[in-house]
Image (cartoon, rainbow, N blue to C red):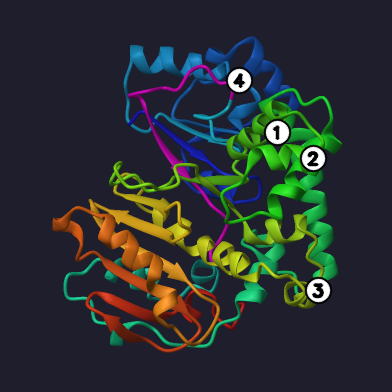
Amino acid sequence: MPVAVVSGLRQAGKTTLARSVGPRRRFISLDDLTLLEQARREPAALLEPRPVTVDEVQYVPEILRAVKLIVDRERVPGDFLLTGSANLLLADRVSESLAGRAGYLDLLPFCPTEWTQRPGGLGPIDRLFDADFDPSQWPVEEGDWPGWLLRGGFAPAVGLSDPSDRALWLESYVRTYLERDLRSLSAVSSLPEFQRVMRLAANQCARVINQANLARDAALPAVTTHRYLNLLEAGGLLTRIPAWAGNPTVSAVKSPKWLWTDCGLAAWLAGANGPAWLGNRSDSGFWLEQTLFQTLQTWRSLDPARRRIHFWRDRSGREVDFILEQDDALVGVEIKQGRQVGAEDTRGLEAWRASLPVARRKTRGVVLNASAHRTLADNLHALPFGWMVPSEIG
């Protein structure tokens, strides 16, 4: 493709990555006010000569039109590398999608496996799709999911061992987002109102958010709350997980559920001030789901053309936390905190598999839990999640 667009949250590492690509590429950062003004006045001139990397392109969406005109005149693979602290396909101010000209990639915060540089990478998740999957080969180790929940995946925050230092960094991060990145996406009249929605949404992580109730709690009109959630998604902070719709005749919940792209940021917004905070909450299971999502979303981002993540819930409350899809193959994933897995823990997986067309009912299901692996039924396994949140931070 003539254009590659790398988007993701601020501090995910986009600039570091972009600077490492090709020593002969020109590098332009629109954080530089002089270049920012030139991009607004003479975007085409700024883009010469090529190949060129333009960092933080969301500040001047008009530059995308100049890129389009150049590509249509002369299509050269790799001419443009664009980065942005926003999902350009969701941003209201961006009218040019570069359809057919650009490949889009998301750069996410680190997941624990990346940060600790595990040699096996995310291979265990890949093996779930193998026809001859052997649960005895699944890695078994103790994990520290509360520790990873509070640290998240931003490199500067993961490296801080003092919780107060990490809280200060996250506070500064949110302030920068509100005062700078948010304004590049849309006009928001009241930043305190927006931050109130952020905190309320963080306290409902890994759930289907009732936007009417959220608007009531925030004392805002429903349309404003809906817009703020969309801005959080466009800014890369929130991720919308669609409901599985494989059988439209089944009475299933159609609304998406929301997870935060970085679990540490979500926990801080929800008021986390140390490990004891989690023990005082009745919704710790949702926070475990949010923590493991840090790894699952990385797995998806490594091959977005082939991989999808969904969830499933029927009207009676039976649910599957995540449904991983790769090349039309499916794996249902249920997440449990405890070490004992019983029939109640597999109720959602069994109901989901029964709702599938007959030809797909042998789809694999797994219950990630804090114990060792064991087979529960045909193609249904209990597997430990410890390797996804290793005890060593690195």
Residue on which the image places disc 4:
93
N-term mark: 2 or 1: 2
What is the magenta range? 92-111
- Identify residue type, mark 2: Ala
Asked whether disc 2 touches disc 1, contact meaning CB atoms under 8 Å apart, the reply is yes
The circle on residue 218 is 2
Q: Which circle, 3 or 1, is nearer the viewer?
A: 1
Along the horizontal axis of the image, is 9 left or right of 26? right
Q: What kind of element bears circle 4? A: loop
N-term mark: 3 or 2: 3
Query: Is residue 94 covered in magenta?
Result: yes
Is 209 placed above or below 374 here? above
How many callouts does the rendering have? 4
N-term mark: 4 or 1: 4
Neighbour tally class for label 3: few under 14, some 14-19, many 20 plus, Cα within 10 Å:
few
Residue on which the image places disc 1:
225
Foreground pick, 268 / 93 = 268
Q: Residue 293 in the image: x percent, y percent?
A: 51, 61
